[in-house]
Amino acid sequence: MRITGGQFGGRHLQMPKGPAIRPTLDHVRQALFNLLGEKVRGARVLDLFSGTGALGIEALSRGASHVTFVERSFFCVQAVEENLKVLSFKKEPPRTAIIRAEAVTGIRKLAREEALFDLVFLDPPYGHRWVRISLNALTQYAIVSTLGLVVAEQDKRDPLPPWVEGKEARLVLKRHQRYGDTVLAFYERQ
């Protein structure tokens, strides 16, 4: 697995030891960042279910101002830390943060800290309703900026709702792109 563009384009990422994970394929990640274009530059990014950290690291490589990684697996957190260290992001602590927690717990913690994100990546294990659960949590807590974007990676056999509304926000599906069995769904906060 490698970074597909930006400052560290072409560099390889470490995979976590321990249980197998399903990282976003290079060509899907490259297509995602091509679709996002300049929205990444200067953005504050939240990488939920970060796994190897590939999505967040790709965002940093393409000019994101800050990325917070949320991951519950000890092995995955180690991989994110190692990938950041190898790419020298650890030398700039204000640009990254890692929270070892389940996604909804991480969202609650960030809300208590009054964190605000322009771009949120959701890439949970397929088939466990984690995208829906996380979208609901994001609408219950005010951590997605106005006109912020949430990108969810989902199995094509598990369609997502056209909108999700909670006490703090409404997320509306603006676009979806299919790559084989993978669908990228783009939700905008309104």
Image: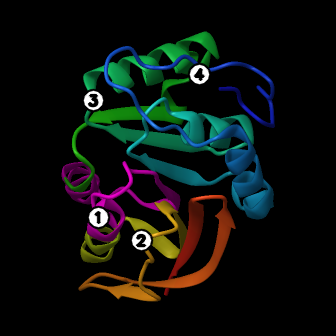
Label 2: how many residues lie within 10 Å, few (<14), some (14-19) or many (20+)? few
Foreground: 62 or 28?
Answer: 28
Q: Quadrant of residue 118?
A: bottom right
The residue to which callout 1 is attached is 129
Image marks 4 and 1: residues in contact by CB distance under 8 Å? no
Say what amino acid the circle numbered 2 marks: Asp
Q: What distance separates the C-alpha of mark 2 from that of mark 3?
A: 24 Å
Say what amino acid the circle numbered 3 marks: Ser
The residue shown at (43%, 39%) is 50
Label 1: how many residues lie within 10 Å, few (<14), some (14-19) or many (20+)? few
Earlier residue among tags 2 and 4: 4
Marker disc for residue 89:
4
Earlier residue among tags 2 and 3: 3
Foreground: 125 or 152?
Answer: 125
Earlier residue among tags 4 and 1: 4
Q: What distance separates the C-alpha of mark 2 from that of mark 4?
A: 35 Å
Q: What distance separates the C-alpha of mark 1 from that of mark 3?
A: 18 Å
Say what amino acid the circle numbered 4 marks: Phe
Earlier residue among tags 1 and 3: 3
The residue to which callout 2 is attached is 158
User: Which one is in front in this view, the residue at disc 4 or the one at disc 1?
Assistant: 1
Image marks 1 and 3: residues in contact by CB distance under 8 Å? no
The residue to which callout 3 is attached is 73
Earlier residue among tags 4 and 3: 3
Q: Which residues are magenta?
A: 105-134
SS category of the residue bearing label 1: loop
